[in-house]
Amino acid sequence: MKSGKQEHSGEVFAGLTLKNKAITSKRFLDCVFRNCDFTGATVRFCEFRDCNFESCNLSLVKLPASSFSGTAFKDSKLVGINWTEAAWPKIKLSCPVQFLNCLLNDSVFLGLRLDGTRISRCLARGADFRDACLAKADLTHTDFSGALFGNTDLTGADLDQARNYAIRVAENKVKGARFSLPEAMALLYCLDIKIV
């Protein structure tokens, strides 16, 4: 990645090591990042549109005022990211980010509009989804051990084969959400009832 170049379109970046580096005011359109290490990097005022991150490490990345549109993360490590620092559109046009087979432990999605997103086959242990909109999201096969759900909109979300979640039905919107047994039994434990 040339430091002086501000816009990158249709490029493939493979094996980049940008640990603890600063990336500022760059635009990436339809780019692919493969086996790149961004651990601890600060990505400020950058735009990622229709990009793919494959087998990358973005743990502890800081994203102040960076934006994502149609960006997918696959087989990547994204531990401890505060996604609320990024710039999110005021109007919901399309799915900004998708995660497939990723490590999202301890990430913060507090209050974000992620309707229709895909968080599938991921580990999202300790992630914070309070006040977020995950309506019609694909949350299948994901491990939500210790993840926080409170005032979360899960209307029509698909949690088939998701596991280890603690979702209080009275404190979240779950109308039309899809759950599978035996994990769906956890929904009953959060109610003030006795199971015999």
Image (tube, rainbow, N blue to C red):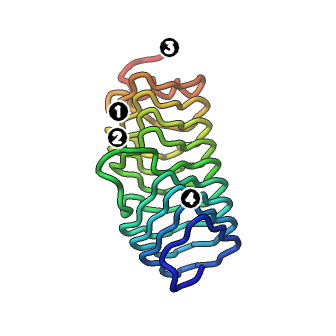
Left or right of residue 184: residue 25: left
Element assignment for label 2: loop
Residue 76 lies, in percent from the top left, at 63, 58
Q: Which mark is residue 150?
A: 2
Q: Residue 196 carries which label?
A: 3
Between disc 4 and disc 2, the foreground one is 4
Q: Mark 3 vs mark 2: which is more N-terminal?
A: 2
Q: Mark 3 vs mark 4: which is more N-terminal?
A: 4
Looking at the rendered structure, the kind of residue marked 4 is: Cys
Element assignment for label 1: loop
Looking at the rendered structure, the kind of residue marked 2 is: Gly
Quadrant of the image occupied by residue 150: top left
Looking at the rendered structure, the kind of residue marked 3 is: Val
Q: Contact, CB < 8 Å: mark 3 with mark 1?
A: no
Mark 4 — residue?
51
* Residue 105, above or below 141: below
Q: Which mark is residue 172?
A: 1
CA distance separating discs 1 and 2: 6 Å
Q: Contact, CB < 8 Å: mark 1 with mark 4?
A: no
* Nearest to the observer: residue 58 or residue 94: 94
Q: Contact, CB < 8 Å: mark 1 with mark 2?
A: yes
Check the image and name the residue furthest to the bottom.
4
CA distance separating discs 1 and 4: 32 Å
Between disc 3 and disc 1, the foreground one is 1
Quadrant of the drawing holding the N terminus: bottom right
Q: Mark 1 vs mark 4: which is more N-terminal?
A: 4
Residue visible at 65% across and 70% down?
A: 13
Total of numbered circles in the picture?
Answer: 4
CA distance separating discs 3 and 4: 51 Å
Q: How crowded is mark 3: few (under 14 residues within 10 Å), some or many (20 or more)?
A: few
Element assignment for label 3: loop
